Image: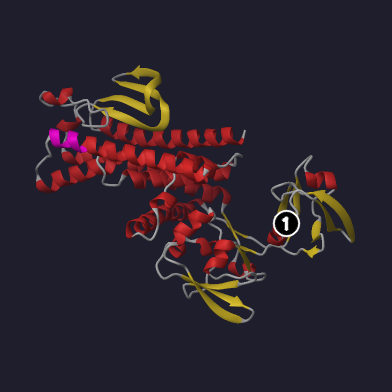
Amino acid sequence: MDILVMAAQLLLGLTILVGVHEAGHMLSAKWFGMRVEKFSIGFPPKIFGKKFGETEYMIGAVPLGGFVKITGMVDESLDTDALKEEPKPYEFRAKPAWQRLIVMLGGIIVNVLTGILIFTLLTYSYGESYLPAAEAQRFGVVPNKLGEQIGFRPGDKIVKINGRPFEQFNDVYSPDVVLGNGSYYTVDRNGQLVDISVPKDFMDKMADADQSFFVVPNDPFVVGEVVPAGPAAKAGLQVNDRILKVGNKTIQFFPELQTALKANANKPTPLLVQRGTQQVPLTVNVDEEGKVGFRPKSLLKYATREYGLAESVPAGTKQAFGIIGAQLKAFGKIFSGEASARKSLGGPIAIAQTYGGTFDWVKFWTLTGMLSMVLAFMNLLPIPALDGGHVVFLTYEMLSGRKPSDNFLENAQKVGMVLLLGLMVFVFFNDIFKSFF
């Protein structure tokens, strides 16, 4: 069932994003009087198609993209028969370069606007919930193995990032920090200030660990929700119970509980819980993953920042373009050799896993907004067969006054398609390798 939910969310997200991207091309082409022969979500073979006016609207069997076929344009179909005749007024090649440029940018522009719209509406609807840095500093952090490798210790209180105080704990994970050069954290460790440097290959280290959250706040907690018929429910654990001990180990924070339960995997384990004014002993059967079937409720004091509609637009725009900034930093790391493409790039399987096996409305739209910005960024790369390749050729034409020949454009399209197919094969099999090996 989890796999089906992952696949359904992936297909829904891609359908939305591909649909609006190709609509951007189609609508701008029609605006300038170009003939649009086909509009397809998904690649052939065709599952369904219906013609309205001059355009056939199609659903393809391969759901990992889409296309718009505009008469007189050298595209991925490589249908160049029409190019042997003189251009007709409704053809792409007959229009001024500036109009063709807008058509090629149409999909990218709409993806950017979609990303901004999604983040604006999320910000307006839900505001921004965050853990204030001062609240996280009350109990310090607990690092995982990656956090320990770079120098964090349990109980460290992060007081500065790159020498400056910060407002919310999520700033610890900011791409500007983890992907930046010369970044460092300052922690209060038992009254002494210690600087912890972020290594240049940190992106690779996070990929190896499959963990972005290399430190998490020490989190005092109570039981928030008990899974029906799970081990915790069978043991008698109740909402608002506070777990004091697992075996002989005293528990204060949720990461401590996780460690203690994993140490008792597949074992009946005594618990001592605080229930109101009473301490109640229980015995729970810990499963093989070190879980007992309940969700914690944090006792840390989170803050919520509310936004009006006018405030949501710049806030949502900042979030959207922050994703582009992170992509640029990540590609910079890859091209400089500080990060591995194999570890950093992900494809459909990785995206589906990120959506997850349960549907969460806010998470779905957040990830879809992120993917919309990533799709815009990737399509702007100056690779023939991508929108960015066409933009490069059109910009050259506008600056030089000379149009590249149809033969050159056809050959460039072939080269670009080979590069793209090679990249698609790489990310797909890389996903499989990372998921199963």
Residue at the location (76% across, 49% down)? 286
Give the x, y percent position of residue 240.
80, 54
Graded by Cα atoms within 10 Å as few (under 14), some (14 to 19) or many (20 or more), the crowding at tag 1 reads: few
Q: Quadrant of the N terminus?
A: top right
Q: Position of residue 27 (x, y in %)?
A: 31, 32
Residue farthest toward the bottom in the current orientation of the protein: 192
- Judged from this view, the residue extending furthest toward the front is 437
Q: Which residue is drawn at 36% across and 54% down?
A: 331
**What is the three-letter code of the residue carrying label 1?**
Ala
Q: Which residue is drawn at 47% across and 43% down?
A: 433
- Which range of residues does the magenta coloring cover? 406-412
Q: Main secondary structure of the magenta part?
A: helix
* As drawn, 301 above or below 319: below
The residue under label 1 is 263
Is residue 38 found left or right of 413 in the rendered image?
A: right
Q: Which of 88 and 273 is in front in this view?
A: 273
Please tell me which residue lies in front, 107 or 79: 79
State the image quarter where residue 43 is shown: top left
SS label for mark 1: helix
Residue 90 located left or right of residue 14: left
Q: Position of residue 16 (x, y in %)?
A: 45, 35
